[in-house]
Amino acid sequence: MNKPAHEDDEQGEIFLDESDIIHEVDVDEEDIPDADDEDDTENIEEEPDDSIHIHRSYRVSLEKLACVTTSKLVCELYVVACSPTDPALVASGGGDDKGFLWKIGLADWASELQGMAILIQSLAFSSDGQLLASGSFDGLVKIWDTSGNLKRTLEGPGGGIEWVKWHPKGHLILAGSEDCTVWMWNADNGHCLNVFSGHGATVTCGDFTPDGKTICTGSEDATLRIWYPRSGESIHVVRRIHLESNLKCPY
């Protein structure tokens, strides 16, 4: 008759004899790990990185792919833009006052945006993917081809460029500035087509509507303005709403 488990515990050590063996299993000694051996962590493979490729270099030469580890180079990325027509083409701007074009999956391909000398604030590809626009803190908008060659420089704003946007159906470029204005140029010939004035502070955001017939802009003056591109007329202004002093935030 089997004894209860607690009775065995009280008796101290329990020894087995041959009559207690139910079944024997042959085990290869090579399959048994050594209890004294420490865990071997050197041969453990790292899990693969899910990213397709990491472009670490922000130098013209791609021999040193070590942006983060180079002591003399600080190159935080502040802006990126993806081509609407080439799934592999990406533009980027960083803290070293340089811009680059990259090809996803091609580690040895990169093209520096020629003529850039100050921090890029914004980047945008045209809708047909043929041109790239950059806006920078010096108040200039520059137009590049997809090889990184500078096509032209657009001047006018008296403050840094906050953002750039392309017309959805052509090579018209829109840019908002710290000087409270919005500018629109023809990127093919460099002509200024209109200047939109009315905001009372930095124009922090803006865009064309999908049909290209209207422009919407927002500013630090807490207003949203709607414009006609051709005339430059502000057709509507949405101003901030002042809360009454007796309104309380519910908890």
Image (tube, rainbow, N blue to C red):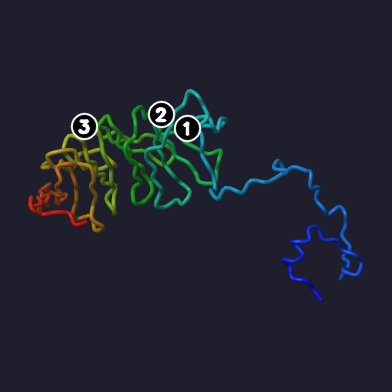
Spatial CA span between label 1 and label 3 = 27 Å
CB-based contact (under 8 Å), mark 3 and mark 2: no
Callout 1 environment at 10 Å: few (<14), some (14 to 19), or many (20+)?
Answer: many
Give amino acid for label 2.
Answer: Asp
Q: Front-most of 207 and 42?
A: 42
Residue type, numbered disc 1: Tyr
Q: In which quarter of the view is residue 11 placed?
A: bottom right
Rendering coords of residue 77 (x, y %): 41, 37
Binning the other alpha carbons within 10 Å of mark 3 as few (below 14), some (14 to 19) or many (20 upward) gives: some
**Contact (CB < 8 A) between labels 1 and 2?**
yes
Q: Residue at x 80, y 50 (%)?
A: 33
Characterize the local packing of mark 2: few (<14), some (14-19) or many (20 or more) Cα atoms within 10 angstroms: some
Q: Nearer the viewer, residue 156 or 53?
A: 53
Q: Residue 148 location, x and y as percent?
A: 42, 36
Residue 90 in the image, given as x and y percentages of width and height:
44, 44
Which residue is disc 1 drawn over? 58
Q: Separation of disc 1 and disc 2 at Cα?
A: 8 Å
Of marks 1 and 3, which one's residue comes earlier in the chain? Answer: 1
* Secondary structure state at the residue bearing disc 3: loop
Which residue bears the numbered disc 2?
96
Residue at the location (34% across, 41% down)?
A: 123
SS category of the residue bearing label 1:
loop
**Is the C-beta separation of discs 1 and 3 under 8 Å?**
no
Hey, which quadrant is residue 38 in on the image?
top right
Q: What residue is pinned by disc 3?
A: 159
Quadrant holding the C terminus? bottom left
